[in-house]
Image (cartoon, rainbow, N blue to C red):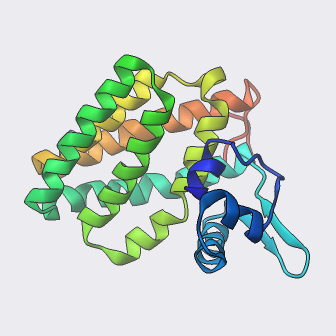
Amino acid sequence: MLEEQIVTLCLEPGAVLSENRLADALGFGRTPIREALQRLAREGLVVILPRKGILVAEINPRKQLLALEVRRELERLLARAGAMRATAVERARFLEIAEGMERAAKDNDDISFMRFDHELNFLESQAAHNEYASRAMGLLHGMSRRFWYMHYKEAADLPLCARLHAQLARRIAMGDADEAARASDQLLDYAETFTRATLGAGALSVGGSRTS
C-alpha cells in the first residue's frame, strides 16, 4: 500500500513522512510501517535521515538510464529462467496477468496497469527460482514504476506498454526461453525509448556522450 502511494505520486518526491501518521492513515502498527519504510529505503524510494526524518526520494531520469542497463540483463535472465522453471500454477497466473494487461491496454487504465505490472514483476522473480537475481531485481522495480507513472502522460504509449508486458507474460507461460528473452528485450527497448523521451532531444547516454 505504501509503495503504491509513492509509485503513483500520492506521496510526492520530497514529501516528509511520519511513522505515526502513516500508521494512522493505513491502519497498521508502527512496527510494520517501520519495516516497510526500511525496505523502501533499500529500494531507493525513500531516504531515511537518522534523527532528522524520512523523505520520499527524488526522481532522476539519468539515474533511470543507469538502472535500465542493469534491468535489461537481469530481466532477460529472469525471463529465460522463468520460462524454463515456472510451475504449472505460476504459468497459469502468467496467462491471467497477460489477459489483465490486455484489458488495461484496451481501457487505457493506468492504475490497473500499475497493479498488474507489480504482480508480473513479483511473479517473474518468483518463477525464476533464483534468489540472487530476484533480490537484485527487487531494488529496481519500484523506482522504475514510479518513474513511468510520473512521465507516462507526456511520453508513454500505455496500450503499447501494456501489450509488451502481456507478450512477455505469455512467452514465459509458454516455456520458450528464447522467445521470453526476446520479449524481455523488446520491453526494455521500449522502456529506454520512453526514458530518453523524457530527457528530450539532448538526452545523454549512460556513458556521458550525447545520443545520435
Front residue of 116 and 65: 116
- Tell me if 197 is positioned left or right of 76 in this view: right
Q: How many marks?
A: 0
Q: Position of residue 148 (x, y in %)?
A: 59, 38
At 30% across and 73% down in the image, what residue appears?
130
Residue 125 falls in image quadrant: bottom left
Against 202, residue 31 (above or below) is below
Query: Can see residue 207?
Result: no
Quadrant (top left, top right, bottom left, bottom right) of the C terminus: top right
At 73% across and 39% down in the image, what residue appears?
204
Query: Can see residue 56?
Result: yes
Q: Position of residue 87 (x, y in %)?
A: 12, 63
Q: Position of residue 119 (x, y in %)?
A: 37, 51
- List the single residue furthest toward the right: 52
At 57% across and 31% down in the image, what residue appears?
194
Q: Position of residue 9 (x, y in %)?
A: 68, 42
Against 80, residue 111 (above or below) is above
At 14% across and 52% down in the image, what residue appears?
91
Front residue of 194 and 212: 194
Residue 36 falls in image quadrant: bottom right
Front residue of 111 and 191: 111
Quadrant (top left, top right, bottom left, bottom right) of the N terminus: bottom right
